[in-house]
Amino acid sequence: MTTSDSIRIEKLCYSIGGRRILQDFDFHLERGVNRTILGVSGAGKTTILKLLLGLLEPDSGKVFIGDLCITGLPEAQFIQQRKRIAIVFQGGALFDSMTVGENVGYRLFEEGRLTQAEITKTVLEKLSFVGVEAALNLYPAELSGGMKKRVAIARALAADPDYIFFDEPTTGLDPIGVHNICNLMQRLQAEGKTTLMVTHDLATAFSTSQRFTFLHKARVLFEGSEEEMKASSIPEVCEFLEPTDRSLFYDVQTTHDRQPEQVELL
Amino acid sequence: MNVAAIDKILLIFFHGLQSYFTLAGRTVVRIFRRPFYYRECAIQFDTLGFSSLFICTLTGLFSGMVMALQSLIQLKPFAATSYVGGMVAVTMIKELGPVLAALMVAGRVGSAITAELGTMVVTEQVDAMRVEGTDIIKRLVVPRLIAMLIALPLLTIVTDVISVFGGYIMASGYSINPLLYISGLPQFMVFQDLIEGVVKPALFGVIIAITACYVGLNTKGGAAGVGAAAKQAVVLSSVLILVADFFMAKIFVVFRG
């Protein structure tokens, strides 16, 4: 495995308004190894995805897509590298003013390489893959939460990326919706896509990933396989896997650890 | 207030100022770069410009009428009521027309642009566009700037014409000879006044578009953040319009010699 087949973060620090979100964070996503980043709400999981995509600028440290260090580079200089990656945002982030078909074909329209007929064919293929081809001409406001996520997956697939990031893909879905999303992720992995998911949903994580990273208070507390995680003696990991009454105090403690301006926002 | 607090406020102010002018500069540069979003420009022109026609018509009509009414009261003791047409025209075309139309559009369109972009930011649609390889300034800011740059001068011309017509209605009600009203128009005006009346709204259009986009793209928080951003955009662009109007007037006075 060469570095061109991976995405990695080295010694990264990131803070918002004086609150440290990530401290000396190292991360390596190899092609073919599906990963999940776990942690309580507010642990900085989504921030990691945005840093990997170059949507946020770290305080220090480096982010590499393949061999290219994207930290400090203008966006135009790493757009080609970033096209290897797609993301499914937590709420879908579908464009309100466009139909489902236009959403899915957005990148293809922007690139302008394909004809209208070829784009339509690709869009229908991707919508069919996720099972919402009937929604082609609907607007996002007319879709249910589960359908929005599936359309977002279709949009992510349209440009045929190597890596797909999932930000809390099962949050707010009913059990059938969760099952459908897990099933889709497994099918994507079978087709050779590498997935990186951030979630606090353990069942989804264990059914779709081989490696797990556990974040706590801006640092990585655990990194390993499902078996290693379940056998871990780290108190925070044990508490996360099997919450007890102490968990009530866990949230309070987390809140107190934050800066006053953040507490006011909660 | 201690020195550290003043330092922090100044730092935030100048950082904001720098970001504002950086966005303005990048937007202007991107107007001339490919790809050109013609369809998006046309949609924005329709949404932001054409839909403001009614509000500008009303503004022009009533401001013209009130200008004529006040002028008639002032001119009557001097038996100079025949000059009312010229007074209405010169005031509306040079000053009130551009400023009132811009303030109306800032309230109506500026808040709409900020709310739309702010919602796109907080729902991660802007991030999604960036990941898809889109230049956000090119896709979201440039079409709005072009739309405002074309629409506001046109809306101002409509406001001016309607206001002169409103003055005419009011003057007719006070038994002023219509021919006297119309013949008074060129007596108070020179060609430069017409230029001034079109150049000003073009600049105001740039101010509204850039301010609304800047505030919208920097929206933080959820629904409350979007509301606060919309309010901020309207206040900021209104103040900037009035400040810019003064400096533009000063520049035109210098050119007039």
Image: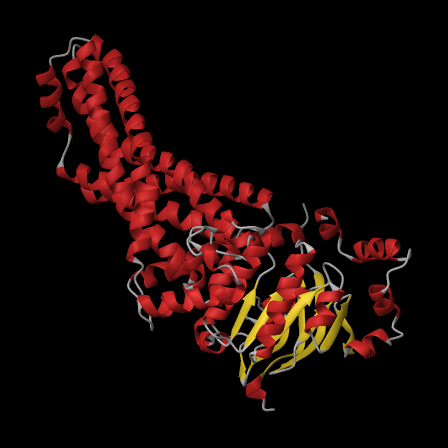
Q: Position of residue A263 (x, y in %)?
A: 75, 50
Left or right: A98, with A170 as reference point: left
- Which quadrant does the C terminus of chain B fall into? top left
Left or right: B159, with A79 as reference point: left
Q: Is residue A164 above or below residue A151?
A: below
Left or right: B63, with A83 as reference point: left
Query: What is the number of callouts on the image?
Result: 0
Image point 31% across, 69% down: which residue? A115
- The residue nearer to you, when weighing A107 against B10, is A107
Q: Is residue A135 above or below residue B155?
A: below
Is residue A2 visible to the viewer in this orientation of the structure?
yes
Rendering quarter of residue A224? bottom right
Q: Position of residue A33 (x, y in %)?
A: 65, 81
The figure's colour scheme reads secondary structure
Rendering quarter of residue B159? top left
Is residue A58 visible to the viewer in this orientation of the structure?
no
- The residue nearer to you, when weighing B127 against B205, is B127
Q: Is residue A29 above or below residue B155?
A: below
- The residue nearer to you, when weighing A225 against A180, is A180
Left or right: B126, with A172 as reference point: left
- Which quadrant does the N terminus of chain B fall into? top right
Image point 9% across, 22% down: which residue? B183
Rendering quarter of residue B85? top left
Image point 61% across, 54% down: which residue? B7
Q: Position of residue B251 (x, y in %)?
A: 27, 44
Q: Position of residue A165 (x, y in %)?
A: 59, 70
